[in-house]
């Protein structure tokens, strides 16, 4: 760009025809890696935003040579149609419609041109559909009849018509929430329904009369989209289904025809269509057996197949699962139908072994529906019995259970062979075949495990004997070494662990005795570190799933725990971690067993454990010791005698307390000892051990807390001064040195210990009188005095936790807290949106605690201090970090609620009402804060309803300039203010639109309707039109999810074994 200014002037001179070569050269520069790229992009943006640019689109498209320039022209046209269509005069809109239609016809009448310019034509189609969303049906009533009749004149034109019709259906039925108001969506759906007869006729006409592969495929693709919502009569009252079934065996159309058949097969219709569905299924199965004979090994064929063949297997799984979900009971009616049904289920079982996770998920999703359904019908034989462990006596087994017995047995084998890895198992095989510790959880695998576990529990209830026999047979083969593989043993043990609680107690005990004995034997006879690690992880997983069995069998419990102590000395990656985690899990459910004196024992197990404590934990890493201590804390908590409990606690804390006293003694002699890295790490470990025990023991930890608290505050203060001095002398980079990080970790753990104790303590008075005063200067004063980089966000978190716990007991301390942390923290976090992320969150959590529990303190603030609070909240909800913005909005919601019901309501709203209204509208209408829509709506609903004269008793407008009688009420003033604000902010909206929107905001009192009204307003502003608007519907989704969770919880509680034993509430697992 030699003369950029001249080029810009020439391009932006709309009194002259557009200079196509100049435009093409600028487009080329903008897409290339030259130094002029940014300049060229700016110039194109200026051109694109010019109100007359769209009038040059036809000249650009007809004369330009490069594709990039043509696409640029289409972008201009699309932008005008999406955002400025309503502002164009009628004749210009008609001109654009004609221009687009003629352009599409020109490209689609010539097949060679159509194939060459497919991407360009697709873009034209998208733009045409944007026009239809505005003008159809009222201003373009003849569109569907015209396009249908034109399609019969040319096969390529017809193929493109199918693409347009598909896009139209997707826009109306799938993506309407993005940029259509609810009223417009409803109108378009009704129009498509009314016009579908013509579309249906065209599809059938094409499928009957053409042999052109591309056209048939395009037609089937379009049909597939429409079949999800069409009036049902069109499917069975025409020959459409027959045509699809005849196309299915042809390789070219097999996949897309199968997709259409899947849509039809999944439809739920009245009993008058039962015969058609039966015939449809039987005819389909005849066709399928010609394509894929029943004896074909589908997993093997899938492995060797082409992409199309693999897609066919996936589509086949979707067909069977969809059809069976809708019509399986229909196929159970006659022996002939039953035979076809069982063949179909056999196909689906075979597909379930395919080594593709998506295919397996599809099948598993169905089995997770099918098996509970069979179980429910088996229980329904005797309606008085919801569930019974016992066999059903001599009566005939339920008909469905008998019919599906072979399939159910195959499913048990499938679940055992393919069981997914549970969360507790952290010893895994890596891609190189080595046994290692898992470093990251795979949420997909965990979800898959949950589904498989549930399915297997139901399968177990349907036939305990078969489940037990299959599992024990596989275990025998592992023990005999005939089929010994890591994966084989893993899936078997995961399956065994997954059915805990689903068998009758006597049967479960017998089963488990065999399993645990065999696994312990396998561990003894197997050689090789990796092999032993795999077996160890499986033993630990299985025993962790059956706490009820362990509680009922002390000898087994003791053997298992001692085995875990053995594994704690095994240094293979992951084994020690899993041993400590399993020990914690067992202690959680069996804690009481360890503190009572068992038969044939000299002393309670905990006493024995504490005597050998040092030996047991000598090979564990610090984080493993913390888990171990947390587990023993649970045991001690189960002891009801205070003197015994305190004795156990003293013995447990003996080693860490000895280390602590030794370090303090050395420090008194030589303070420099505390600077040594090893000493700092030792202090951190001692404090973390205290945190672990406090977490599990709760209130009784007070005895130990009294011992460590005073010295801990001294150490905290000392390290704090050291950190401040180091950062002051060394500058900001000193904060990132290892030395400072180590010292800060000690401070963080100390704060964590105080916060944990405050949370667990059952006597708030002790904390308020004994501990809070002692903390004010060493912790709070220290925070205020420190340099920014040395301040710990955990201080804010600690005081938020204390205020949440002590509530009004902290009223007297809040002014000191405010003085110490407020301004200094705000200076840190308001410089930008990136620095000190933890401080941001914890600062607002502290403010939230004050607003909720010590609200009276806000009344005592000076106007400048209260303004600082409100400004900080506004700053928070403006934040682009979602959790900070959400915290700010929740805080504002509570603040408005508290002030609205107080005597200070009038003064507060006179100062802040308009400011807050403007700020909330600003964030609601930008695209960075969509996740907050639910809270924006809640706050605005409050602000529009709070204008009641009994709440705000004085004018909100400036009385000095306008006079006290300028408006009849605050509502009238705010209405005018809002109309002016929105008209100025959104010039694309007419005054009539804005007035109607504001009127709705005032008049709609129901919150749900108010929210819908706000959504429509946002669509009209076009602020959100080009992005995904799922966030605007988040609350409805959340409500649905909560309802589903509750239903799911009730369903699982009704069937023994569905909720794992280790997740049952403690009262359901009470110690015998």
Image: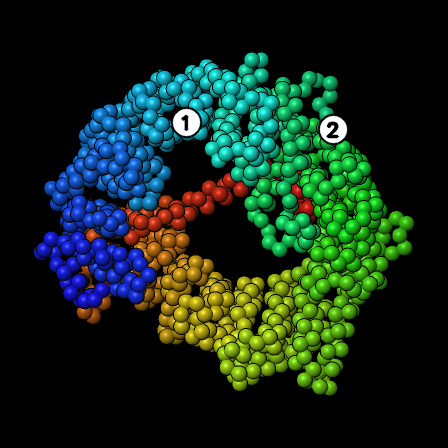
In what element is the residue under mark 2? helix
Front label number (1 vs 2): 1
Q: Nearer the viewer, residue 310 or 871?
A: 310
Q: Nearer the viewer, residue 1056 or 864?
A: 1056
Say few, some or many: other residues with alpha carbon within 10 Å of mark 1 (under 14 / 14 to 19 / 20 or more): some
Mark nearer the N terminus (1 vs 2): 1
**In the image: residue 86, left or right of residue 447:** left
**Quadrant in the picture for residue 450:** top right
Residue 935, relative to residue 673: is it above or below? above
Task: Say which residue appears at 16% left-offset and 38% top-offset.
Answer: 98
Q: Where does the N terminus fall, quadrant-wise?
A: bottom left
Task: Say which residue appears at 20% left-offset and 39% top-offset.
Answer: 103
Residue 544, percent across and down? 72, 47
Residue 950, percent across and down? 32, 57
State the colouring used for the structure image.
rainbow
Task: Say which residue appears at 39% left-offset and 47% top-offset.
Answer: 1030
Q: Which residue is mark 2?
A: 465
Q: Nearer the viewer, residue 912 or 239?
A: 239
**Quadrant in the picture for residue 748:** bottom right
Give the spatial CA distance, label 1 vs label 2. 46 Å
Q: In this view of the protein, can residue 593 be seen by the observer?
A: no
**In the image: residue 590, left or right of residue 119:** right
Q: Residue furthest left?
A: 15
Q: Which residue is mark 1?
A: 253
Q: In this view of the protein, can residue 115 be seen by the observer?
A: yes
In what element is the residue under mark 1? loop
Residue 360, relative to residue 421: is it above or below? above
Residue 7, percent across and down? 17, 62
Q: Which mark is residue 232?
A: none
């Amino acid at each position: 760009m030699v003369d950029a200014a001249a080029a810009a002037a020439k391009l932006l001179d709309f009194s002259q025809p557009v200079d196509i070569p100049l435009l093409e050269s600028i487009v080329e520069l903008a897409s290339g890696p030259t130094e002029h790229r940014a300049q060229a992009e700016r110039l194109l943006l200026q051109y694109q935003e010019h109100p007359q640019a769209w009038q040059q689109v036809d000249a650009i498209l007809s004369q330009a040579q490069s594709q990039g320039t043509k696409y640029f022209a289409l972008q201009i046209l699309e932008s005008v149609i999406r955002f400025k269509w309503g502002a164009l005069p009628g004749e210009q809109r008609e001109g654009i419609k004609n221009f687009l239609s003629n352009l599409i016809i020109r490209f689609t009448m010539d097949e060679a041109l159509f194939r060459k310019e497919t991407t360009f034509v697709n873009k034209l189609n998208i733009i045409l559909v944007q026009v239809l969303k505005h003008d159809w049906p009222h201003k373009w009533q003849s569109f569907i009849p015209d396009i249908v009749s034109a399609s019969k004149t040319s096969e390529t034109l017809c193929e493109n018509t199918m693409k347009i019709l598909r896009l139209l259906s997707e826009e109306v039925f799938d993506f309407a929430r993005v940029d259509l108001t609810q009223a417009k969506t409803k109108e378009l759906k009704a129009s498509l329904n009314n016009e579908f007869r013509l579309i249906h006729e065209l599809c059938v006409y094409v499928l009957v009369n053409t042999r052109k592969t591309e056209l048939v495929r395009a037609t089937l693709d379009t049909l597939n989209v429409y079949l999800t919502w069409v009036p049902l009569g069109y499917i069975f009252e025409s020959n459409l289904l027959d045509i699809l079934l005849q196309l299915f065996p042809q390789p070219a159309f097999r996949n897309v025809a199968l997709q259409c058949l899947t849509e039809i097969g999944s439809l739920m219709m009245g009993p008058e269509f039962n015969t058609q569905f039966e015939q449809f299924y039987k005819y389909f199965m005849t066709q399928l057996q010609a394509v894929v004979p029943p004896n074909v090994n589908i997993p093997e064929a899938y492995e060797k197949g082409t992409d199309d063949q693999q897609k066919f297997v996936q589509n086949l799984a979707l067909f069977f699962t969809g059809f069976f979900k809708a019509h399986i009971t229909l196929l159970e009616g006659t022996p002939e139908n039953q035979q076809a049904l069982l063949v179909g289920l056999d196909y689906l079982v075979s597909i379930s072994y395919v080594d593709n996770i998506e295919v397996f998920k599809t099948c598993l999703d169905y089995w997770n529906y099918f098996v509970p359904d069979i179980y429910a019908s088996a229980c329904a034989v005797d309606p008085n019995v919801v569930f019974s462990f016992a066999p059903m006596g001599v009566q005939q087994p339920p008909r469905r259970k008998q019919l599906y017995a072979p399939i159910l047995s195959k499913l048990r084998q499938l679940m055992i062979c393919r069981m997914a890895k549970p969360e507790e198992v952290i010893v895994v095989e890596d891609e190189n075949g080595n046994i290692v510790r898992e470093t990251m959880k795979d949420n997909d695998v965990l979800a898959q495990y949950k589904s498989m576990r549930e399915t297997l529990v139901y399968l177990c209830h349907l036939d305990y004997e078969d489940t037990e026999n299959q599992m024990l047979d596989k275990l025998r083969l592992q023990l005999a070494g005939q089929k010994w593989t890591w994966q084989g043993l893993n899936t078997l043990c995961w399956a065994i662990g997954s059915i805990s609680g689903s068998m009758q107690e006597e049967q479960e005990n017998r089963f488990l005795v065999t399993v645990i004995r065999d696994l312990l034997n396998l561990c003894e006879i197997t050689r090789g570190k990796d092999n032993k690690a795999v077996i160890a992880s499986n033993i630990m997983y299985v025993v962790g799933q059956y706490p009820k069995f362990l509680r009922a069998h002390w000898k087994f419990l003791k053997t298992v725990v001692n085995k875990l102590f053995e594994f704690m000395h095994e240094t293979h990656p992951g084994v020690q971690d899993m041993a400590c985690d399993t020990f914690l899990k067992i202690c959680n459910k069996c804690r009481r067993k360890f503190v009572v004196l068992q038969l044939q024992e000299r002393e309670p197990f905990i006493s024995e454990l504490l005597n050998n404590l040092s030996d047991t934990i000598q090979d564990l890493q610090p984080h493993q010791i913390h888990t171990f201590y947390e587990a023993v804390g649970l045991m001690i908590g189960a002891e009801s005698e205070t003197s015994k409990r305190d004795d156990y606690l003293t013995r447990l804390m003996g080693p860490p307390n000895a280390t602590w006293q030794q370090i303090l003694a050395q420090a008194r002699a030589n303070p420099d000892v505390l600077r040594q890295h090893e000493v700092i790490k030792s202090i951190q470990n001692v404090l973390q051990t205290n945190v672990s025990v406090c977490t599990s023991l709760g209130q009784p930890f007070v005895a130990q807390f009294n011992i460590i608290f005073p010295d801990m505050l001294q150490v905290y203060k000392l390290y704090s001064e050291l950190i401040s001095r180091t950062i002051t002398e060394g500058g900001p980079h000193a904060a990132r040195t290892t030395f400072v990080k180590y010292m800060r970790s000690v401070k963080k753990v100390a704060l964590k210990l105080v916060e944990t104790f405050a949370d667990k303590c059952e006597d708030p008075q002790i904390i308020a009188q004994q501990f809070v005063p002692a903390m004010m200067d060493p912790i709070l004063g220290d925070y205020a005095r420190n340099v920014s980089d040395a301040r710990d966000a955990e201080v804010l978190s600690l005081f938020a936790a204390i205020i949440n716990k002590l509530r009004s007991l902290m009223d007297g301390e809040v002014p000191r807290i405010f003085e110490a942390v407020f301004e200094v923290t705000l200076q840190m976090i308001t410089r930008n949106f990136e620095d000190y992320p933890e401080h941001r969150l914890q600062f607002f959590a502290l403010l939230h605690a004050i607003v909720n529990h010590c609200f009276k303190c806000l009344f005592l603030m000076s106007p400048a201090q209260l303004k600082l609070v409100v400004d900080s909240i506004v700053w928070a909800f403006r934040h682009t970090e979602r959790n900070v913005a959400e915290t700010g909005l929740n805080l504002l919601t509570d603040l408005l609620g508290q002030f609205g019901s107080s005597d200070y309501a009038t003064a507060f709203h006179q100062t802040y009402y308009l400011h807050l209204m403007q700020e909330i509208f600003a964030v609601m209408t930008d695209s960075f804060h969509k996740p907050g829509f639910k809270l924006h709506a809640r706050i605005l609903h409050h602000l529009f309803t709070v204008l009641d004269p009994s709440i705000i008793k004085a004018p909100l407008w400036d009385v000095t300039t306008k006079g006290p009688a300028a408006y009849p009420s605050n509502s009238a003033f705010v209405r005018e203010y809002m109309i002016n604000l929105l008209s100025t902010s959104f010039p694309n909206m007419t005054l009539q639109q804005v007035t109607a929107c504001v009127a709705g905001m005032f008049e709609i009192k129901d919150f749900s309707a108010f929210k819908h009204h706000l959504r429509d307003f946002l669509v009209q502003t076009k602020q959100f039109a080009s992005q995904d608007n799922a966030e605007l519907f988040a609350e409805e989704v959340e409500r649905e999810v909560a309802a589903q969770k509750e239903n799911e919880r009730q369903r699982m509680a009704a069937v023994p074994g569905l909720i794992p034993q280790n997740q049952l509430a403690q009262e359901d697992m009470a110690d015998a």
